[in-house]
Amino acid sequence: MLKAKIKNIMVSLLLPLCFLVVGYGILGALAFPYIRPLHSIYAMISQNQTPDFLKEARQLYNQEKQLPTSGMIDASTLTKMKITDQYGKIDIDSVQIHVPLIYGATTKCLHMGAGQRIQSQMPGFDKPVMIGAHTIPYFKDLIKMEKGDTIKITTYYGIFEYKMTGSKIAKATDTQAYDLLQNKEQLILFTCYPVEGLGEKEDRFFVYADKISGPTVVGEIK
């Protein structure tokens, strides 16, 4: 009889606890898409200062160095890139965007600045260059760009300029929104859309621009 009472007491205590744990688990799963962006925003709380985690990047970019704006560059003289390397800077004066350019598009890379997708090429190789960044604090004003605006990318090996030709809103999963196999140096910038609000977003805002100046890199990086 005593054992039965103890068993009933244990059941009455454990059953609500189990429901509580399951409930918190479900709540956490539903809230995760909203918590993750908040964490990223907290990590990047200062909009006008270089984030502390940029110090973790290998710094290839030196803004004091004199860089070519035309001519040819032998690719064998360039450094072999590693994920999270900062190898340049993006400046869009028309919308006051000034962002570090990072090699790679991992979560860590996107905390540091604008990340170049490694499936695309770096500037100067006559191939598409695809770069994405979080809306806050980096690309929130990308949507304000207008056709004809100039985008300047300064890398550790040269200075490149692109002119905006158009924009598009598409699903994040829409691979037809860009072509990384074209034989043309098209710059593709993208960020989450809409730019307001938090949480996971299904759409992306794309900006397309053609190269108008800068050196040409020939050969392969060794």
Image (cartoon, grey):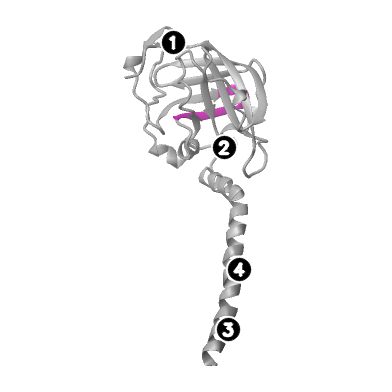
- Of callouts 2 and 1, the N-terminal one: 2
Q: Is residue 102 magenta?
A: yes
Residue 216 tag number: 1
Q: CA distance from mark 3 to mark 4?
A: 17 Å
Q: Residues within 10 Å of mark 1 (few under 14, many from 20)?
A: some
Which residue lies at the image location 58% right of the left edge and 84% below the top edge?
A: 8
Q: Nearer the viewer, residue 194 or 3?
A: 3
Instruction: Report which residue position mark 4 lands on.
Output: 19
| Label 3 secondary element | helix
Q: Are marks 4 and 1 in contact (CB under 8 Å)?
A: no
Q: Quadrant of residue 212?
A: top right
Q: CA distance from mark 4 to mark 1?
A: 63 Å
Task: Name the mark nearer the viewer: 2 or 1.
Answer: 1
Residue kind at label 3, given as amino acid type: Asn
Q: CA distance from mark 2 to mark 4?
A: 40 Å
Q: CA distance from mark 1 to mark 3?
A: 79 Å
Q: Is residue 144 above or below residue 186?
A: below
Task: Name the mark nearer the viewer: 2 or 4.
Answer: 4
Q: Are marks 2 and 4 in contact (CB under 8 Å)?
A: no
Q: Position of residue 24 (x, y in %)?
A: 59, 62
Instruction: Report which residue position mark 2 lands on.
Output: 137
| Label 4 secondary element | helix
Q: Is residue 121 magenta?
A: no
Residue 165 tag number: none
